[in-house]
Amino acid sequence: MAFTGAIYCAISQLARYNSEPVVVSLQRDYRSWSFTFPAVTACFLERRDQEKMKAVIQRFWNVTEDDQEKFQYYQEFVELITDISFRENLQNFWKYQDDDSLKGIDLLQLAIDVHPDVALNVTLSHHVEVQWIPVMTEEGLCVTFNSEYAQFQQTTDVRRRHKLMMCHYHSEFCFVRIDALTQGVRYFIHSPYDIATAISNPTGEIYPGDELNTDFKMVEIVAADRIKSLRPEQRRCKYPDEWLADSIKAYSFGLCQMHCRTKMAIMFCGCRPYFHTKGDGDVCDSDGMACIGRNVEILVNLPKNLAKCTCIPQCAELNYYSHTKKILVR
C-alpha cells in the first residue's frame, strides 16, 4: 500500500507540474533599473479634411455638392471608413451592401487620402526628434511613436527602426509633452512591444486649449530564461519569437487578439477587415465589411468555442498604469 501511495503521489505531482509548473521569481536591485518609455498612439477625433473628402468623392464617383443627395450618401460612407471602430459603428456597413459603385475601392487608401495633414508638436526630456509613424488600428487611422510593434499596423511597407526611448530609475524628469493646437486627440499609452486594439481603453481625450497631465507607474514582468523549454500551456506565456504567423513574426497579447479576429473574419466572411494591414486572406470591400458588421460581437469577444485560439500574456511584459491624471481646461 505504501509503494502504491508513493507512486500515486509522484504521478500526481508530475501531472501538477506539467499543467502548472511553479516558477520562482528573482528580485533585482531597483536602483539600477533602466526602463523603457511607453509607446504613445494618438488618434485625431476628426479624421477627415473636408477639401480632401470633396476631391475624393468627385474622383471616385464624379459627384459634387451640387447633387446634395448623392454627395451626402458618399460623404457618410467616407465618414464610416475614417471613423471606423469595432466598438461603435461597424454595424452601419449594411447600408452600403450590394452597391456596385463601391466595389473595388481600396478602403484603407481611402482613409489615408482624406486624413488631415495635422502636425503634433512633441517635446521630449531626451531632446531627440520624434518621428510619428502612421498606423491603421482597430479604432481607425492614428500615429504612434516609441513602438517596436508599429510595423504590424503600418500603412506603408517602409520599415522604420528607431531606438526605443529609455529612462533611468534616478531620472527626475522623463517625460513627453504633446501639443495638438487645432485638433482634438485621443491617446493610448501602451507597451512598446504591443499595440492598441479594439478593447484598449484610451488614456484620455484632449481638445485644443486643454492640458492633460498624467503620471504612470510601470510594472515589468520578466520570466526566467530556463522556463522557455516548457510548453506555452505550462508556462502560460509566450516569447516574442513564438510567431503568430508568417505575416506577423512576433507575439504579444494585442497582436494575438488582432490575429484571432482576422482568422474569424475570414472564417465568417471570407476576408479580413481593411484596418488589419497584416494578415492572411483577401481584404474586405464594402460587402465584406457588411458581413464583418453582422458578426462584430463575436469578433470583439472572441468566444473560445469559435475562435480556437487562446491569447496569453507575454513572458516579458511591460505594463503602464495611470497613477495620477489631471485635466486643465483653459
Image (cartoon, rainbow, N blue to C red):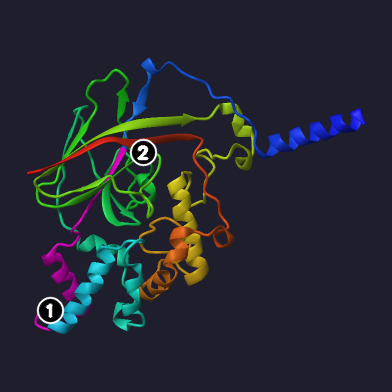
| Residue situated furthest front in the rendering | 1
The reply to whether the magenta stretch includes residue 59 is yes
The label shown at residue 64 is 1
Quick check: 247 left or right of 90? right
Where does the image place residue 299, in percent across and percent down from the top left? 45, 62
Sequence-first disc among 1 and 2: 1
Instruction: Measure the C-alpha gap from mark 1 to mark 2.
Output: 43 Å
Q: Residue at x 12, y 82 (%)?
A: 68
The residue pinned by badge 2 equals 192
Q: Residue at x 21, y 34 (%)?
A: 176
Q: Are marks 1 and 2 in contact (CB under 8 Å)?
A: no
Magenta part of the chain = 39-67
Where does the image place residue 182, in percent across and percent down from the top left? 9, 51
Going by the numbered disc 1, the residue's amino acid type is Thr
Quick check: 181 left or right of 87? left
Where does the image place residue 90, in percent across and percent down from the top left? 35, 67
Where does the image place residue 213, in percent across and percent down from the top left? 19, 36
Q: Secondary structure at mark 1?
A: loop
Q: Residue at x 93, y 31 (%)?
A: 1
| Residue situated furthest left in the rendering | 330
The label shown at residue 28 is none
Q: Secondary structure at mark 2?
A: loop
